[in-house]
Amino acid sequence: MGSRWTFDGHIAGIGTTSGLRAVVGIWQDSPFGSFADVMLQQPSGHRLLLASTHEVAGFIAATYTFDEVRVLDVAATLTDHTLTVDAGPLAIRASTGPRTLLGAALRAVPRHLAVHPRWLAAVNPFAALAAPGARTYGTAGSGRTEFYGVTDLHHVTTVVVSWEGSDAGALAPIRPAVTFGFSSVPPRPSLAHVRTTVVEP
């Protein structure tokens, strides 16, 4: 077994009527400590990473594909029903609703199994059936493999997004799908509790 990196936290997928789409990572436990990052895709398709340190930016940029990387202060807080993000030109204020039916089903799977790479490789063919665009297993760049273990899911119900001082519009489906890597987020904006494992042979 080669090197392994494990990230425990949350991923929020948010779409807006302007076409701006954001994938926010809030990581409570990781090889880089606690941090947040934002993968942003503009209406033009331009893919942008906002990361808090050069070390974090380097790892994420080696795992996913971006047209631009910016290192700046990324602050994110997550309470029971509120997500707040301040990252340079980007500000997000989002509210989440009750647990979804899929979230309830995910919580029924014992966590030690739900985040295990072998389980995630086995259920990958069914992931897109449950959440279109999502995958649990795939190539993570630089010869590495990545596993997504989602253990809970809540819909995002309201959002206010500002980009470079302008309102990005109301909450909307994440369409077209983001194209940072092998997996997208579900079209309906949501907040997932997740463990991401990256393995290098």
Image (cartoon, rainbow, N blue to C red):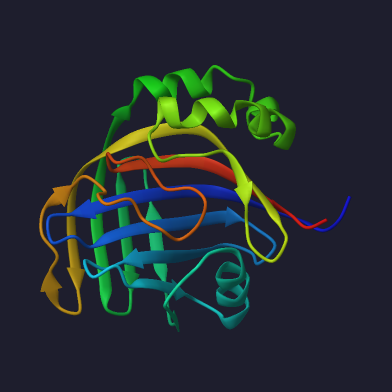
- The mark total stands at 0
Residue drawn at x 74%, y 32% is 118
103 shown above or below 26: above
Q: Position of residue 23 (x, y in %)?
A: 38, 56
Q: Quadrant of residue 163?
A: bottom left
Q: Position of residue 30 (x, y in %)?
A: 65, 58
Q: Horizontal placement of 163 versus 184: left or right?
A: left
Residue 148 shows in the view:
no
Residue drawn at x 10%, y 59% is 169
124 shown above or below 77: above
Q: Position of residue 87 (x, y in %)?
A: 35, 73
Q: Horizontal placement of 150 versus 19: left or right?
A: right
Q: Residue furthest right?
A: 1
Q: Position of residue 72 (x, y in %)?
A: 43, 82
47 shown above or below 99: below
Q: Quadrant of residue 200?
A: bottom right
Q: Horizontal placement of 154 versus 5: left or right?
A: left
Residue 79 shows in the view:
yes
Which of these two is toward me, 84 or 51? 51
Which of these two is toward me, 15 or 145? 145
Quarter of the picture containing the C terminus is: bottom right
Q: Horizontal placement of 168 versus 97: left or right?
A: left
Which of these two is toward me, 65 or 80? 65
Q: Quadrant of residue 141?
A: bottom right
68 shown above or below 183: below
Residue drawn at x 42%, y 48% is 184
